[in-house]
Amino acid sequence: MFPRHVNPVQWQLAMDYARQACARIFRDGGSAAEALRAFDLPAAAEASDWNTSVNRIAEALCAGQQRQAA
């Protein structure tokens, strides 16, 4: 799902980075919740899904860029 308030190029870059980071954590035997903790995000009950973790990490990356720009 693409958030409309984010630049499309920024969203694609954030998704690519989040996928790559999650793939490394998965390869090392980690869980989706551990991937969220690696980005200082709270691991919720629905975080057992890798897709949800990737989306939340990408959202956090985009939100971090918007906070810095403001």
Image (cartoon, rainbow, N blue to C red):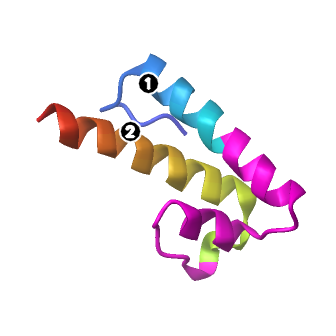
Q: Is residue 59 left or right of residue 38?
A: left
Residue 35 colored magenta? yes
What is the x, y in percent for residue 39? Answer: 51, 60
**Residue type, mark 2 in image:** Cys
Q: Which residues are magenta?
A: 19-45
Q: Tell me the quarter of the image containing the C terminus.
A: top left
Q: Quadrant of residue 49?
A: bottom right
In the displayed structure, 30 sits above or below 16; it is below
Say which residue label 1 marks.
10
In the displayed structure, 56 sits above or below 61; it is below
| Residue under the image location 55 percent in, 76 percent down | 43
Front-most of residues 65 and 50: 65
Farthest residue to the bottom: give it. Answer: 45
Say which residue label 2 marks.
62
| Residue under the image location 43 percent in, 43 percent down | 61
Q: Quadrant of residue 10?
A: top left
**Structural distance between the alpha carbons of marks 1 and 2:** 7 Å
In the displayed structure, 37 sits above or below 11; it is below
Front-most of residues 9 and 37: 37
What is the x, y in percent for residue 11? Answer: 48, 29
Cβ atoms under marks 1 and 2 closer than 8 Å: yes
Crowding at mark 2 (Cα within 10 Å: few <14, some 14-19, many 20+): many
